[in-house]
Image: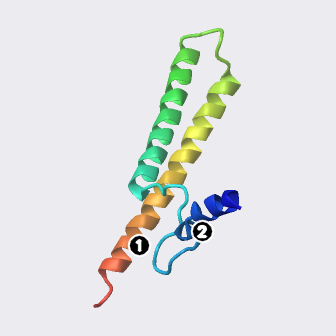
Amino acid sequence: MADWETRISSINPGAYLQQPGRAAPGPARADFAEVFKAALDRVNASQQEATALANAYAMNDPNVSLEETMIAASKANISFQALVQVRNKLVSAYHDIMNMQI
């Protein structure tokens, strides 16, 4: 019987019940600025990779093919265009918010 009493006394009811107005415990959320910076870094890396492959192909590097170079350039172009569209939507949302009347 003492074993059950020990188990019951060690239960923390607050750990199992979510209180109103408090966030549920879970994984930490990423800050929007951090996510946007990471996206910028990925786009920059893809553009640098495409540039490096284009330079290597121009120098007749036998390890770099034209197909690989063109694919890298296309990926960099598409990722840049997507990033520009996200930026445009953010600027538009900012302008909408700033033009709201209080």
For the C terminus, give its image quadrant.
Answer: bottom left
Residue 17 in picture, x, y percent from top left: 57, 73
- What residue sits 62% from the left and 26% below the top? 69
State the residue in front, 79 or 65.
79
Q: In the image, which disc is placed on residue 16?
A: 2
- What residue sits 55% from the left and 46% below the top? 79
Q: Which residue is mark 1?
A: 93
State the residue in front, 20 or 53.
20
Residue 81 in picture, x, y percent from top left: 52, 51
- Residue 21 vertical position relative to residue 60 in the rendered view, above or below: below
* Mark 2 element type: helix
- Residue 69 vertical position relative to residue 101 in the rendered view, above or below: above
- What residue sits 64% from the left and 59% below the top? 7
Badge 1 amino acid? Ala
- Residue 39 shown left or right of residue 5 in the figure: left
- Residue 3 shown left or right of residue 20 in the figure: right
Q: Return the disc, 2 or 1, that comes first in the chain's sequence.
A: 2
